[in-house]
Amino acid sequence: MSGVDAERDAFYKNARYDLPGPLVGIRVLEVSTTWAGPRCGCVLADYGADVIRVELEKVPDITRRLPPMLPGSQPPDGFLHASANKNKRSLSLDIRCEEGREVFMRLLPHFDVVLENFKKGTMSGWGCGYEDCCKVKPDIIYVSITGFGQFGPYSERPGYDPAAQAYSGFMWLNRHNAEDVPLRAPTFLADELAGLHGALGAVAALRHRERTGEGQLVDVSLLDAAMDSSTGLLALAAAGITMPPMGNPMHFASPTGIYPCKDGFVYAGVLLDTHWKIMAKMIGRPELADDPRYESFMGRIKHRPEVDALLGEWCKQHTREEVVELCRVHQIAVAAVCSPLEAVNDPHVQAREAFATMQTGENSSIRLSNPAPKFSRTPVRTRTLAPQLGADTETILNEIGITPEECAAMRARGVI
């Protein structure tokens, strides 16, 4: 057994593999689309909650069809849908019609959380808003994720991830200098953050209900989530201090940034003065360790172009892996700038079991991300693939007492 295996086994020595995760027993009705809502539901499902995803059969979620389709998926599945809806069950139900709404309300007493991310007022217009649900289940936790929230001057506007990145100041900051065009993050950053805040908000509200018996509405906006996760830069802006865009370097540390090597790039740098002394010796310039221009971090910031050039010239003389190894030996923070393909196949990523291989057919499989946290007692993992539309409809309805005959009749009328 390798050292890595031994460490992993020691971490999980008291694990409960008979449970899907720490949220076992929590049930969630998810009526959502695209990414922020599904991401929120995915976190709860990953942690062991029974998440039922409600979709319209005639208008399935667009992520099922957005290319590229994930190679190996059977039948072909959009990469967004496969990633955000694993570990869930699928219920095909048209809640826009009266009979579908009645079924939704029959389901409600059996659930702890309703999760939705439609434009403000949409669910209420269908008779499934928070106030409607409270009449049936007063202690329901109702999580609403929108672009701009349930109140405020912009709350009526449709809001997507790029709008939140733009309004939050992120795009303005995400450039090398003031002359560059602002740049969107390649991930749905605001959607991701709103989904995580929504999941955390649901768990916090469940804890409050456990103590008091009180349910509540949890209002999460993409804009709020993006601004809350700004690493303090917006606190400076609120105080009248605007940090200029700098791209890869960090404002408060030098040298820092991306440096080209013989065969790729690394992100490297130092913050602590003690680390500068080590780095100076590592790059073959020991005389600079106690140079009064560079020995303090304020001095290095003042002379940023000079110290950046010193580290940059040293990196150019080495391969990427040589730089990483030398920095590791000297305990200087560094990271190889990996392509996505390199990242998912990295040995550390493999050892951390960040991805699960899921069989999609007799001779086909796909790799999907595992949940990020490692729970030593209640391990979590990718258990099931994203379901086909309506795959669990009759099972779910049977669980609440709707008979197969009733299901057949509703299917004939287009309700399910």
Image (cartoon, rainbow, N blue to C red):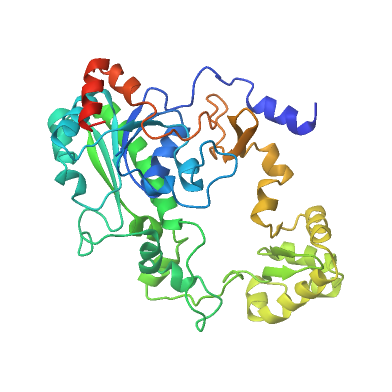
Picture coordinates of residue 125, whole percent (x, y): 15, 46
Vertical comparison of 409 with 365: above or below: above
Q: Quadrant of residue 296?
A: bottom right
Given residues 14 and 284, the one toward you in this image is 14
Given residues 346 and 397, the one toward you in this image is 397
Given residues 377 and 381, the one toward you in this image is 381
Assign the C terminus to one quadrant of the image. top left
Q: In the image, 248: left or right of 323?
A: left
Vertical comparison of 125 with 54: above or below: below
Could you tell me if residue 396 is visible in this image? Answer: yes
Picture coordinates of residue 103, whole percent (x, y): 20, 28
Q: In the image, 290: left or right of 147?
A: right
Furthest residue toward front: 412
Residue beneath the point at 69% across and 39% down: 350
Q: In the image, 40: left or right of 178?
A: left
Picture coordinates of residue 208, whole percent (x, y): 29, 33
Assign the N terminus to one quadrant of the image. top right
Q: Quadrant of residue 5?
A: top right
Could you tell me if residue 401 is visible in this image? Answer: no
Residue beneath the point at 78% across and 32% down: 3
Vertical comparison of 210 with 168: above or below: above
Q: Give the number of marks.
A: 0
Q: In the image, 142: left or right of 356?
A: left
Q: Quadrant of residue 260?
A: bottom right
